[in-house]
Amino acid sequence: MTLDGLLAGAPPRDDLVVDGRGRYSSAEVESRVRAVAAALTAREVAPGDRVAFRLPVGVDAVVAYRACWRIGAVAVALHPAAGSHQLTQALDQARPVVTIAAPDFPPVPGVDPVAMDDLTGAAGGAAPSLPVEAAAGDDAAVMFTSGSTGTPRGVIHTHGSLAHKVVQLTGAHGLGRDDCALVPSPLAHVAGLLHGVLIPGASGMKTVLMARWDPEDALGLIERESVTYMVGPPTLFTTLMDCEGFEPSRTAKLRMISCGGAGVTPAFCRRAAAALGAVVKRAYGSTEAPTITTSRFDDPTDRMILTDGRAFGDARLRVDASGELWVTGPEVARGYLDPADTEAAFVEGWFRTGDLASVDDGWVTITGRLGDRIIRSGENISAAEVEQHLEAHPAVLQAAAVAEPDDRVGERVAAFVVAPRGFDLAACQQWFAQRGAARFITPERVEVLDELPVLASGKVDRMKLASRLRDRSGRSGRAGP
């Protein structure tokens, strides 16, 4: 199945997309898609060509994706907040034939973008002159990972991989035409693409797009638009519950929240479920393998909040001798733009996630990253294990552990915590001793931050934390791959 075909089968509605500028019906979105598709065809964009776009979260980004698929082009989504250096790296890899940008975005050296308004008004809504019959195995989108290594990697998804994931998630979450999704994620992220463009477009449900997260604005949107479904990191929902004017009655229609990234603790899930009146569950995935594991809306609550879920459909998982989770299935990307990256991460159809995991009767719990191991005097220490001890302390809301270079033991454990009521090294060491934790995993440095730095994906930016240690020691704190 191709994405254009999947989206074409949805029942029409008067409010398919709502953004900060207006409310757009299925017919209005389709008219814009036809116009942009025709304008791109007039610019000699051919099937298989890559079209890059850097647009704010809103209807224009939805249209850009769908217009590319209409003519068999490959959509290359660029993060609207990316800097010029990151954008240059991404464009050098993707080599698009056309780049579309909003007029108020800063220019990128050497790039002459086309304004979206010029495309939507150029063809008067005419259809492309020739229909394009894409195949499920054809490339559909390139999305860039926001990994901590510094250089973005272009992940290639096909029509088939994305369509399969749309069908699977729609069923797992019990979504239908009567639902409404609030999406504050950039549509250049795979979560934004799935939950802001594809799942609503295929099911005929309304999607409400936020260009910038503001908890008070979000609360108003949830109430006015009868939002039933949200996906995002826990920081979104914590700020929502803590904002002035929050009342449980204002989120009465919200029934399902799926959380990934840092800080999805059982305590958070229970608090959010009670305050927001919704099913709150954990999920795990990546740009390369979106939502590898999750729970159904009717799964046992303990499984939803104590594990990262289970694989659905045809996805298969395995854990190798080192504890790394591997995944294969129709939803997995076909590789990266750089063949060397593909060769390193994709082995005979299996994607090596780089994450450490345990599996209990099919239920998966992510325990850390391969590169997040701290090696102290020859002892391998899991950063995730340290963080679990820290986050069990009543004063600690969130924690991250990284390796701090040490001339005597090689590396020692440094902890960064969010603890508004205070938390110091003495309290930390007393807590670890009280819990019976091994002395060698007990942090030897504790720093309290107002918030942990995070990547655009919602994961903790361990490179930034390691750089704080580097600035003090003159040596590099190790933060993983």
Image (tube, grey):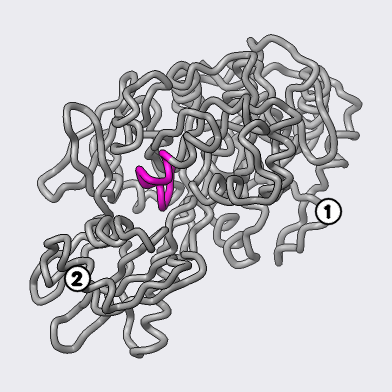
Marks 1 & 2, CB-CB < 8 Å contact? no
Assess whether residue 374 is covered by the magenta stretch. Answer: no
Residue 426 position, x and y percent, is 26, 78
The residue to which callout 1 is attached is 103
- Describe residue 206's horizontal placement relative to residue 405 as left or right: right
Disc 1 marks a residue whose amino acid type is: Pro
The magenta stretch is 260-270
Q: Nearer the viewer, residue 385 or 336?
A: 385
Res 405 → quadrant: bottom left
Q: Can you say whether 73 is above or below 118 in the image?
A: above
Disc 2, SS: loop
Residue 444 position, x and y percent, is 24, 78
Q: What distance separates the C-alpha of mark 1 from that of mark 2?
A: 52 Å
Q: Is residue 97 visible in this depiction of the protein? A: no
Q: Can you say whether 207 is above or below 7 in the image?
A: below
Residue at 34% from the left image edge and 36% from the top image edge: 305
Please tell me how many numbered marks the rendered image carries. 2
Residue at 42% from the left image edge and 58% from the top image edge: 397
Assess whether residue 265 is covered by the magenta stretch. Answer: yes
Disc 1, SS: loop
Q: Nearer the viewer, residue 419 or 410?
A: 419
Disc 2 marks a residue whose amino acid type is: Thr
Res 392 → quadrant: bottom left
Q: Which labelled disc corresponds to residue 442?
A: 2
